Amino acid sequence: MNGNGGLSNVEMEYIRRHHRHQPGENQCASALVKHIRAPVPQVWSLVRRFDQPQKYKPFVSRCVVRGNLEIGSLREVDVKSGLPATTSTERLELLDDNEHILSIRIIGGDHRLRNYSSIMSLHPEIIDGRPGTLVIESFVVDVPEGNTKDETCYFVEALIKCNLKSLADVSEGLAVRDRTEPIDRV
């Protein structure tokens, strides 16, 4: 992990407990945090859909999963143009509906993310008096030849930040819709 980057003690404890990456010599690792103004079940309903990452990941154009959705399941992801990639083959490593943890590993595809593994965990919190979600996403990945650890981490962090912002936007939109109830006129 790259220092504590201003993370709270609670965030650091969740990272210690659920995000145990052990980067090798030629790898970089990091963890990002996002506070979402929507309850955990709302956010988890999007995150847990290994078969539908395009529901909140803006760079995914299509996803196909073969067979049942279970540990070891593979998904073939098509990436929208504009990124240095076109496809990604990803394996579901962990899907824990009780602890709200999802882990994936990239095992193939047309991109430079070799030995990429990520863990996403969701934790309940209160934001402005309403149920919210603390989302932590961590990763470890090989540093490609010709790149530095800093460059590699910066690139992956930028992608994850974009995905987390989109996850927040979609989740918060659903939460607002669910809170909006018609007013009966008398």
Image (spheres, grey):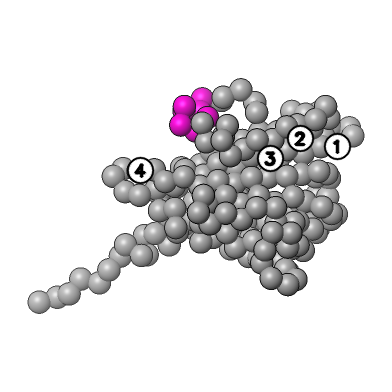
CA neighbours of label 1 inside 10 A, class few (<14), some (14 to 19), many (20+)? some
> Distance of mark 3 from mark 4, alpha carbons?
26 Å
Residue bearing the label numbered 4: 127
Percent across and percent down for residue 88 are 79, 57
Q: Is residue 35 above or below residue 110?
A: above
Q: Inspect this view and state whether residue 176 appears.
A: yes
Q: Marks 2/3: CA distance?
A: 11 Å
Between the C-alphas of marks 1 and 4, the distance is: 39 Å
Determine which of the numbered discs, if any, sits on residue 29 in the image.
none
- The span picked out in magenta is 6-12
Residue 145 painted magenta = no
Q: Which residue is mark 1?
A: 144
**Element at label 4:** strand
Q: Disc 2 to disc 1, how far (Cα)?
A: 8 Å
**Where does the C terminus fall, quadrant-wise?**
bottom left
Q: Earlier in the sequence, mark 2 or mark 1?
A: 1
- 74 and 165: which one is in front? 74
What's under tag 1, amino acid-wise?
Pro
Q: Amino acid at mark 4?
A: Ile
What residue is shown with label 3?
A: 139
Cβ atoms at labels 2 and 1 below 8 Å apart: yes
Q: Which residue is mark 2?
A: 152
Specify the quadrant that holds the N terminus. top right
Q: Is label 3 or label 4 in front?
A: 3
Residue 107 at what x, y percent from top left?
82, 52
Compare marks 1 and 4 and give the one earlier in the sequence. Answer: 4
Above or below: residue 25 compared with residue 101: above
Q: Kindly state the secondary structure of the residue where label 2 is placed.
A: helix
Q: Residue at x 42, y 46 (%)?
A: 124
Between 117 and 112, the one nearer to me in the picture: 117
> What residue is drawn where x is 83% and y is 44%?
114
Left or right side of 185 for 159: right
